[in-house]
Image (spheres, helix red, strand yellow):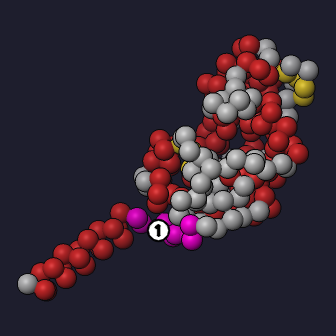
Amino acid sequence: MVSDALQRVLRLLLLATVCIGSWTYAQTSTRVTADQVAQAILNSPTASAELKSYAQAVGNLAMFESGGQLSVYNGSCCYGVLQMTKSNIWSATKLTTEQFRNLPLQDQVNAWAGIMSTALNYSGINKLQALGTFDGRVVDGNLVLACVQLGIGNCDTMRKSGSCSGFADINGTTICKMADKIAGGTASSTVGSVA
């Protein structure tokens, strides 16, 4: 009887190993720096050339979004150092949010970069870039990055309104405010929990 139970446990462990694939796991309390995130973008096989050109801005975005915490959950929708939604995590990795929160930096960045590289090709983003200026500000990489991070539909809402105040998330963050935080490299004071 012990051998049957042991065999079942071994089969479950084998199945778990196969399901997880090549993902490696990090400690849940790991913090990274903006420079480490930027380097991970540059090293990412899923990052487009355009996204790689924003590498330092992505590092600053991570500090704003998560304070550099790999395992953070913001309490409403998003997980990890670059705050991905549950559906984007599943789409990019086929992992649960708990598994994703425990991935090392490079794996989290690879998942995020694949989604964002696709989003950067969206026609609404191209229309924003073509404006050159928006609501009195230059359309730069920080604004574009904030736009895709807060969602291409939300970006369109802002662009069509003609104003930075045309969209704000549940926390009152507008795309332009996020772009300013990215440009300044300022971390958020409310980054969620790691529990």
Magenta-drawn segment: 20-28
- What is the quadrant of residue 104 in the picture? bottom right
Q: Is residue 164 magenta?
A: no
In the foreground, 142 or 5: 5
In the foreground, 82 or 170: 170
Q: Residue furthest left?
A: 1
How many badges with numbers are in the image? 1
- What is the quadrant of residue 106 in the picture? bottom right
Task: Give the structural element (helix, strand or loop) at label 1.
Answer: loop
Image point (88%, 23%), residue name: 133
For label 1, the residue is: 22
Looking at the image, is 82 positioned above or below residue 139?
below
Measured from the top left, where is residue 10 in percent x and y?
25, 78
- Dot 1 crowding, Cα within 10 Å, few <14, some 14–19, many 20+: few
Is residue 128 left or right of 96 when viewed as pictured?
A: right
Is residue 74 left or right of 90 when viewed as pictured?
A: right
Looking at the image, is 94 positioned above or below residue 16?
above
Measured from the top left, where is residue 155 in percent x and y?
69, 26
Looking at the image, is 160 positioned above or below residue 82?
above
Image point (51%, 70%), residue name: 24
Quarter that holds the N terminus? bottom left
Image point (64%, 42%), residue name: 116
Measured from the top left, where is residue 108 in percent x and y?
59, 57
Looking at the image, is 195 positioned above or below residue 158?
below
Q: Amino acid at mark 1?
A: Ser
Can residue 187 be seen by looking at this rendering? Answer: yes
Measured from the top left, where is residue 68 in percent x and y?
71, 58
Is residue 11 left or right of 57 when viewed as pictured?
A: left
Q: Residue furthest top?
A: 161
Characterize the magenta stretch by its predominant secondary structure: loop
